[in-house]
Amino acid sequence: MSFLARTIRPFAVSQQVFKQFAKPSQVIRAFHNSPPQYKPQSNPLRSTASAFTKSRLTFQNAFKRNYQQQSANPLAQGNLTQRMLYGAALVGGTALAVNLIFNRETRGETMPDYERAYLNDTFMHTGLGIGIIAIAARTLHASGWSYRLMSFNPWLVIGVSLAASIGTMYGTFRTHPDNYVQKYALWTGFNIAQAAVLSPLLFMNPAILARAGLYTLGMMGSIAFVGATAKQEKYLYLGGPLLAGVAIVALTWTENIWLYGGLAVFGGFTLYDIQKILHHARMAERGLVRKDVVNESVSLELDFLNIFIRMVQILGMRQNNRR
C-alpha cells in the first residue's frame, strides 16, 4: 500500500504545479484584472523581440505587481530578532499542540540506539535531498529554464515530468543498497527532476518562499516528533486511508481541497512515514530487511515538497487578499 502511495505522490506534486497553467490561479486573475503598468515605448527593436524576451517581461511584471509590494504584516516590518522569535514561537507552539492532541499515549521505553541512528540517517539524507533540489532549482532558474518551461505545452510538461520523476524513483527503490554508485546516481536524478518541475516557484517573492519553508519545517518537525515518540506501529494503519486521500487530492480541481485537504493528507503521510521508518529499523535490526535510508528519505522528501508547495500558494493568496 505504501509502495502505491509513493507512485501517486509524485503525480500530486507534478500535476498540481502545472494546474496553474490550465486554470486561472489567484496570481493570473490578479494579473489580468489589474490595469497594465507596463507601457510599451516606441522602439524599433521591440518589433523584433523574441518570444523568450516577451515571456520574461510578462512574468517579471506580473510577479512584481503581486509579490514585490511591502507587506502589511507588522511582524514583517520588524527587525530580524522579532521575526526569528515569532518563527520560533510558531514552531514550538505547533509542536506542543500537535503533541498534546495526537500523542497522549507515548512509548514507555526510551528509543533504542539503532532506531535513533536509522532515523537520524534518514533525516540527514532528506535534508541533503531537499538541498540538492533547492540548489538545482536555483541554477536552472538562473539559466532561464523557468521561462522556457512556462512556454511549453502543459500536458507535455506533465507527461515528461511524470516519466522522469517516477522512472528515477522506481530505479532508486529497485537498486540494492550495496550498489552505492547507481543508487545515489538515480536518487540525484530524482531530485534534479523535482527541481526542474519546481523551478518556476522562484518567480515568487523570496520572503514568501522563506516563510513557507519555515512553516513546512515546523509542521513536519512537530509531526515527526509525535511519530517518533508514539507507541510502536500506532499510526501504521493510516496507509490505506491516506492513499485514498492522496488520490482525491491529486485528481481534484477544487482549489480549497487541493490546498487544505492536501496539507492534512501529507501531514498524515509524514506521521505514517516516520512510524514506517522506525518499523523498518526494527526489522533491519532482526536481519529481515536491508537498511536503506535513501529509499526512506524519498518518502519524506515528497511529503516536504507537497506541504511546501501548498504553503507557498496559501501565503501568496493571503498577501493578495490583504491588498
Image (tube, rainbow, N blue to C red):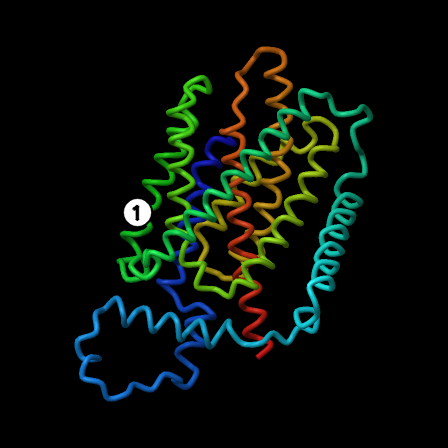
Residue 35 appears left or right of 320: left
Query: Considering only vertical position in the picture, is 57 above or below 284?
Result: below
Quadrant into which the C terminus falls: bottom right
Helix, strand or loop under label 1: helix
Residue shown at 82% from the left, 26% from the top: 108
Residue 167, percent from left and from top: 34, 35
Residue in view at x 47 percent, y 36 percent: 6
Asked if 13 appears above or below 185 in the picture, the reply is below
145 relative position to 118: left or right: left
Q: For mark 1, what is the residue?
A: 159
Q: Position of residue 150 (x, y in %)?
A: 32, 61
Q: Amino acid at mark 1?
A: Gly
Residue 45 x %, y %: 19, 79
Q: Could you tell me residue 267's position as x and y percent?
A: 61, 45
Q: Residue furthest bottom?
A: 42
Q: Residue at x 45, y 17 (%)?
A: 178
Out of 24 and 123, give the one closest to the viewer.
Answer: 123
Label 1 neighbour load within 10 Å: few <14, some 14-19, many 20+? few
Q: Is residue 115 above or below residue 157?
A: above
Question: Image height check: is 269 above or below 38?
Answer: above
Asked where in the image residue 190 lies, by quadrant, the reply is top left
> Viewed as shown, does residue 149 lie left or right of 310?
left
